[in-house]
Amino acid sequence: MRLLLCAVVALSAAGAWAQAPSTLASRSVKPQVEAAQQARQRTAELPASAYERPADINRHRALVSDIDTTAQLVERRASTLSARDLALSKYYLAQANDKAQVLSTRSLQPISADSVAELRTAVAPVRTLRAKLTSGQPPFGYRKVIVTVKAPAGQPEPPRLRVYVLPSGVLDRPEYFGVDTIREWLQAFAFEEPTSPSRGTVPQGEMRVWVGPDRMYEAMAKRVFERQPIAFALLHIAPDNAPELTLRFNAPGDIVKP
């Protein structure tokens, strides 16, 4: 497995320990709901002259409506969702809201078809989320992953380490989410078992996995927020029937220290 060294740049089935009880604040979906409502109102106020193509007016409005409707649904279901499912819901809503907010802000340049298409891409996981919640299905899929950490021959084995996981977008734009949210999500997505080996599940999507000292959520969140280098394994969406994936990290070089 080839690890990637990232100097972060701007732009279910988890165990009980990994999903520590969430506080009332972390369970709140209010910021996502308010952002979606604001974008929907602003979009409704845009004149036809704000678009390159008249056909994109209704498409744009339908997309921001999807975000708003889903945000309200997640807010109603927040108390029933696992820590990971709620974190993922808030993450995808935040990504879609960001695109929608930018697009709904009037500028001298008309809204292009490409811009509406980019918004549609950001809204796609939100639409899937709403459809699954409405039909009573689990909102997200997870893949089984085994993480091992090995020392060079003749060297002592590394200490027990925690497996940390975050969506790629969080590391790409940590300032958009904030250190408190990053810490909360690190706790939600971390593997329950320490290394090595450590067995857990990783959400289906663009996710980054790395290993570091155990239970250092605060310090690790700060490292992510400050865009310090992180050696991670990048996981993409896998087929539903994909076999268990094994990721190997080498000590001490691949161990991320807060």
Image (spheres, helix red, strand yellow):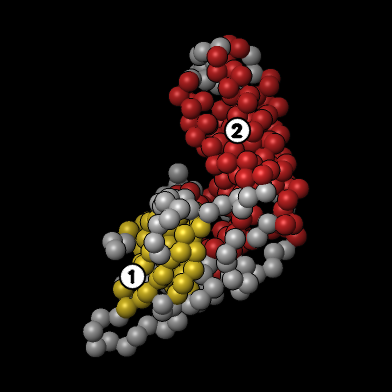
Give the amino acid type for the residue marked by disc 1 in the picture. Answer: Arg
Give the amino acid type for the residue marked by disc 2 in the picture. Answer: Gln
Q: Is residue 35 visible?
A: no
Q: Secondary structure at mark 1?
A: strand
Would you place residue 74 above or below residue 47 in this image?
below
Image location of residue 175, percent across then percent down = 53, 50
Would you place residue 136 above or below residue 66 in this image?
below
Viewer-closest of 156 and 16: 16
Q: Residue at x 60, y 33 (%)?
A: 101
The residue that label 2 is drawn on is 101
Question: Mark 1 and mark 2: span between their CA atoms?
Answer: 40 Å
The residue that label 1 is drawn on is 248
In the image: residue 251, left or right of residue 36: left
Q: Residue at x 47, y 50 (%)?
A: 205
Q: Residue at x 41, y 70 (%)?
A: 146
Binning the other alpha carbons within 10 Å of mark 2 as few (below 14), some (14 to 19) or many (20 upward) gives some
N-term mark: 1 or 2: 2
Outermost residue, left side: 153
Image location of residue 217, percent across then percent down = 55, 69
